[in-house]
Image (cartoon, coloured by chain):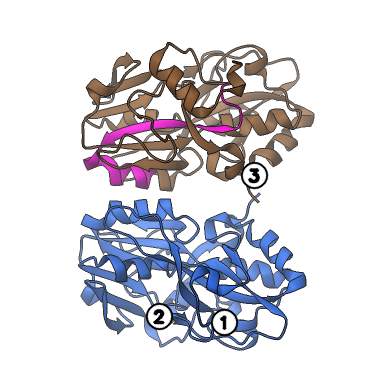
Chain colours: A blue, B brown
Amino acid sequence: MQPAQMTAAEVRELARTQHMTTTSGYAAGYMQANLLAVSQEYAFDFLLFAQRNPKSCPIVGVLEAGEYSSELLPGGDIRTDIPSYRIFKDGELVDSVEDATEYWDDDMVGFLIGCSFTFETALVDNGIRLEHIEQGRNVAMYKTSIPCAPAGVFSGPMVVSMRPLPANQVADAVRITSRYPSVHGAPVHVGNPEEIGITDLSAPDFGEAVEIPEGYIPVFWACGVTPQAAVMDSRPRVAITHEPGKMLVTDARDNQYQVP
Amino acid sequence: MQPAQMTAAEVRELARTQHMTTTSGYAAGYMQANLLAVSQEYAFDFLLFAQRNPKSCPIVGVLEAGEYSSELLPGGDIRTDIPSYRIFKDGELVDSVEDATEYWDDDMVGFLIGCSFTFETALVDNGIRLEHIEQGRNVAMYKTSIPCAPAGVFSGPMVVSMRPLPANQVADAVRITSRYPSVHGAPVHVGNPEEIGITDLSAPDFGEAVEIPEGYIPVFWACGVTPQAAVMDSRPRVAITHEPGKMLVTDARDNQYQVP
């Protein structure tokens, strides 16, 4: 079966049973989500952090302590249905696993955060070529000098994803993505990367470098990897996240997140 | 000074020092907000309840335990700057006061929730007459048979506000309010009130009855009074809310909440 034609449940089963290098391009039209799971003691602080930083941390679902499934992944298991997980202890990346069950405590709360894959589909459907897809790479992501609004123990820099665009498509890209406020929305920055503390576009902090064609302008969107940067800075005891680019594929549809 | 020309800070001072019957029509263009304050032990549950019911409980700000002010009310005090407060104990309304300080515990977390006054300004600016304003009344609000998604200890029915509109303005009202997803957004119901469990439009649960002109259609929006219904059903030990129609006037501008 073609990856794009698979259902979300089929991709989750694939992620549970086989190695996958990315979920990009799978289950077209289904919403993909970032994961952050922390112990209950940090849950209010993180939910508030997300509420205060809605462009980078748009919450699309929360699995309360002891819950492994929800209507976003019917019959699924949040601990196994993502292709790959990162395990953080005291802010340090200590392991990368394809099954997070052994690290999962029963008091962990799983936060699902919107992903730019949702608006990428809309961009492509509107005739905008995305260079990282054309070049067969993961999107390039960078820590910035833009501070997130802190909440409780959580603070850290905004992480952004970058997509180079020809000058005559920048306005269209702004217009289209602004219709998806609950999956990062409009860009946070257009143009000069140094103004937001990015000194070298060829050395992203997450994902892969993407070549910028002559005359293209780098456009930056708030990114769902921001919680991982907050974990690195804020050092909760244990945190479990997805591996960037390897997302939870949910049963929600991208179109549900479009306004107006 | 005309009420509409006052700044948000001036209205907060008025609310702090004098009796006010409503904040509707004051400080045009400034965002007004609903309040719910509960003790820290309920804070995660309520924030999650709001996240799961974004149409009725759009969070626009959270004052953490021990905070009485924020950038939404610079120099203000959340315990005194609303014209009137309702005090709930174990889900029962036990008092109505103009200064909530004596009931406020230092571990209380104050949630500010978007208010339909924001989109009403946009409706009026687009030539839509609002009957409750024309009739000089508070908006009519009803408990419905639509259940909110529960979270932790919180559950309850969605509360809606009703505005009668002529048939040829219903589509415009949908289009305009859908651009304000973070202040209730598009209507949740158009037409027959019995389908959402409202048996008598002349007997609202909150606010005042509004006469419906011949040929007008009742249109229903999710309402920020929903948390008060959740408090009545879920019975937290103590909860402090604003009095419906007497809101916190914030320094945020209505236009900030418009997309795209």
Q: Find residue B35 and report its horizontal and vertical position in percent.
A: 39, 31
Q: SS at mark 3? A: loop
Q: Which residues are magenta?
A: B26-49
Mark 1 falls within which chain? Answer: A
**What crowding class fits label 1: few (fewer than 14 Cα within 10 Å), some (14-19), or many (20 or more)?**
some
**Whether residue B206 is visible:** yes
Which amino acid does the dot numbered 3 rest on?
Arg
Q: SS at mark 2? A: loop
Q: Which mark is residue A116?
A: none
Which amino acid does the dot numbered 1 rest on?
Pro
Q: CA distance from mark 2 to mark 1?
A: 14 Å
Q: Earlier in the sequence, mark 2 or mark 1?
A: 1
The quadrant where residue B127 appears: top right
Q: Which mark is residue A3?
A: 1
Q: Find residue A204 and report its horizontal and vertical position in percent.
A: 48, 82
- What residue is shown at x 67% (from left), y 18% (from top)? B131
Q: Which of the two marks, 2 or 1, is nearer to us in this view? A: 2
**Residue of label 2:** A83
Between A85 and A189, the residue placed more toward the observer is A189
**What crowding class fits label 3: few (fewer than 14 Cα within 10 Å), some (14-19), or many (20 or more)?**
many
Q: Which of the two marks, 2 or 3, is nearer to us in this view? A: 3
Which amino acid does the dot numbered 2 rest on?
Pro
**Residue of label 3:** B179
Decide if residue A139 is on the left or right side of residue B103.
right
Q: CA distance from mark 3 to mark 1?
A: 34 Å
Q: Which of the two marks, 3 or 1, is nearer to us in this view? A: 3
Mark 2 falls within which chain? Answer: A
Mark 2 and mark 3 on one chain: no
Mark 3 and mark 1 on one chain: no
